[in-house]
Amino acid sequence: MRKIYTLFLLIYLFDIKAQEVVKDTLKLTFIGDIMSHGPQIRAALKADGSYDYTENFYYLKPYFDHSNYVIANLETTLGVKPYHGYPQFSAPPDLASACKKAGINVLVTANNHSCDKGRRGIHKTLNILDSLVIEHTGTFESIQAREQKNPLVLKRNNQVIAILNYTYGTNGLPIPRPTVVNLIQKKQIKNDLLKVKQLKPDLLIVFLHWGEQYQHHPNKNQKDLVKFLHQNGVRYIIGAHPHVIQDIVYNAQTDQLTVFSLGNFISNQRTFPRDGSMMLELSFVQKEGTDLSLSHIKVHPIWVYKFKENSKWHYQILPVEKFKHKPDYFNNNKSYQKMMKYYKHFQTYKYENLSKI
């Protein structure tokens, strides 16, 4: 009988110890390019002259509600009238408001469209995001602001998450002084990483705007930059810009993850496979005395459904898993078949294998 009691005591103590080892968990969701083409702006325009983008994100809120932070690439400036799509983007502030309402609470702003509306565009974008209490990084009002706010530091409970964001360029447009746009420059990145090291965050994410548009796999420059970042202590890299999804590479031995491109989150690019993308959920655990480490990867395919109703165009981002068995939801079979075509393309990447950490 004593042996049985001893065994139960050991199991109980082991269970307590196991609970003490795992300190906390964190879930981050990453989504791709938030674009603002002209047809999207016109679709959001209401009869009273205001704009409403709420329906774009209607089906995603349940996914976002399970994450501590939802992080996206804002590939437009905000608030500079007249609002305009390609090639130099400016969207109504209501787009950012709808993002916040849906649960998107962090936006990276360094991309090739950062300077589309000059200094005014950068200033207004940052001011609008601040007014909505949306965290952001990548562009700054001045060098002094960059010194204070780069990296972006998110604090949750006792956890510290640092985010750095860089772009390959700004479409040849000059970066208007005194504003700053973080560029992919190895010397500057090294200096930033030294600063991050001093902060001793539990987690560092580097979000890059890089690669070649519409290419389904990363190029040599992307791969070389990944090596450089890994050599300098970066474990988690998230990418955007190609407007299509690309490979995800995870090394379980080193706990290094590279997501080369998340694709378009929402846009008016209707050419396959630019009409779809993915949501990436990363779960982290933290053991006593260690940094956060990746415990689970989940990838959700999404597709932008554009349809006409009552003589007006509408955009909805659909989680494919939820709608692949609902052909009757679509106003025509052609739209449903387009979504399924994208889903088959998504499956060729075999992302499901990554979830087995």
Image: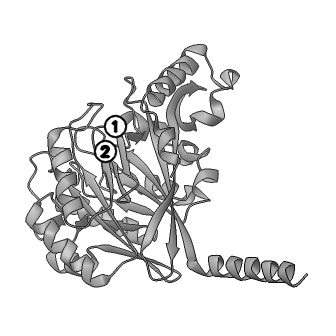
Q: Distance between the residues labelled 2 and 1?
A: 6 Å
Relative to residue 175, is residue 276 drawn left or right? Answer: right
Can residue 117 be spotted in the picture?
A: no
Q: Which residue is drawn at 47% across and 49% down?
A: 280
Per the image, label 1 sits on a secondary structure element best described as loop
Q: Residue at x 60, y 14 (%)?
A: 333
Can residue 320 be spotted in the picture?
A: yes
Question: Which label's residue is closer to the chain start, 2 or 1?
Answer: 1
Per the image, label 2 sits on a secondary structure element best described as loop
Relative to residue 103, is residue 258 drawn left or right? Answer: left
Q: Residue 29 carries which label?
A: none
- What percent of the width, then of the height, locates residue 4? 86, 78
Which quadrant of the rendered structure holds the N terminus?
bottom right
- What percent of the width, then of the height, locates residue 157? 53, 81
| Residue named by callout 1 | 246
Vertical arrangement, residue 305 with respect to residue 31, above or below: above
- What percent of the width, then of the height, locates residue 208? 26, 54
- What percent of the width, then of the height, locates residue 128? 38, 65
| Residue named by callout 2 | 260
* Depth order, front residue of 26/244: 26
